[in-house]
Amino acid sequence: MTTTSKWFKSWFNTAYYHLLYNKRDYKEASFFMSNLVSYLKLKQDDSILDLACGKGRHAIFLNSLGFEVTGLDLSENSINDALKYANESLQFRVHDMRLPFINKYNAIFNLFTSFGYFETEEEDISVLKNIKNGLKQNGIAVIDYLNVSKSIKQLIPHEIQKRGAIDFEIKRQVKDGFINKKINFKDAGNSFTFTEHVKCLDLITFKKYLKTSGLKLIAVFGDYKLHAFNEESSDRLILIIK
């Protein structure tokens, strides 16, 4: 089985990852970004870093609103796809979020549970320290994470998701502080197995991480409409930090 320190390097860089998640809601992503930039009072031409940008769905929309956007992601496959949409004010680069950023930004967004992949607490905190050091004066950052409490209560242990000719068999469990997902499927006569591991990070743990990283929690929301966070009922854990 792929270890927690390496699974994302292989899985995110496959076409199968994008096939499995091809039903992601672009309308919802645009709605969230519009609400977020309004709440943060970002100005035209402010610079935004989309950290772990994937194929750039959030970055592309933010750029359409007039912002200067940089998308960083570890997956070369995703960045190559995103580069089709690059322009003078929209750039994409392959980058490991555990490494310092070259530039500083007015805002840094880490969206759609693109945190908590790593095996050690130190790696997670290194990402937060990079975010702190990557912000301009009075800059602000956003981490959009799953609400672990609700996700665990509603965990589906086993299901089949069909995408075209491929049946993805997905098994989920909570173990060793991670929500673990094992993905099995066959294609063209070959069998494949990939894993996903996301840390069970609740608000209390995030507050500890932020304090260690020298960051301050400004606000907490529970969904993309920016309603108040409720540990029992909220779908998301959205942190506004500086």
Image: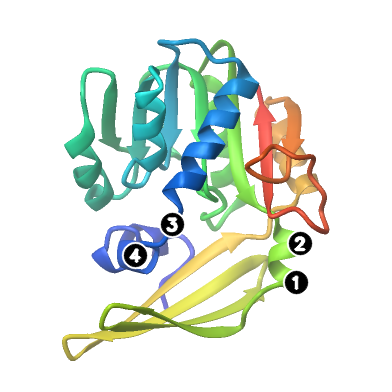
Name the amino acid, label 3. Answer: Arg
- What crowding class fits label 1: few (fewer than 14 Cα within 10 Å), some (14-19), or many (20 or more)? few
In the image shown, does 197 or 149 lie closer to the viewer? 149
State which tag comes first along the sequence, 2 or 3. Answer: 3
State which tag comes first along the sequence, 4 or 3. Answer: 4
Q: CA distance from mark 1 to mark 3?
A: 22 Å
Left or right for 67, reference 141? left
Q: Which residue is mark 2?
A: 149
Helix, strand or loop under label 4? helix
Q: Which x, y percent locates residue 153?
A: 75, 71
Q: Which residue is mark 4?
A: 17
- What crowding class fits label 3: few (fewer than 14 Cα within 10 Å), some (14-19), or many (20 or more)? few
Residue at 55 percent across and 51 percent down: it is 113
Name the amino acid, label 1. Answer: Lys
Q: Which mark is residue 24?
A: 3
Residue at 33 percent across and 46 percent down: it is 74
Name the amino acid, label 2. Answer: Ser
In the image, residue 216 above or below residue 58: above
Helix, strand or loop under label 1? helix
Q: Which mark is residue 153?
A: 1
Q: Which mark is residue 227?
A: none
Quadrant housing residue 68: top left
In the image, residue 84 above or below residue 119: above
Left or right for 99, reference 43? left
In the picture, the quarter occupied by the C terminus is top right
Q: CA distance from mark 4 to mark 3?
A: 12 Å
Are dots 1 and 4 in contact, CB under 8 Å? no
- What crowding class fits label 4: few (fewer than 14 Cα within 10 Å), some (14-19), or many (20 or more)? some
In the image, residue 242 above or below residue 165: above
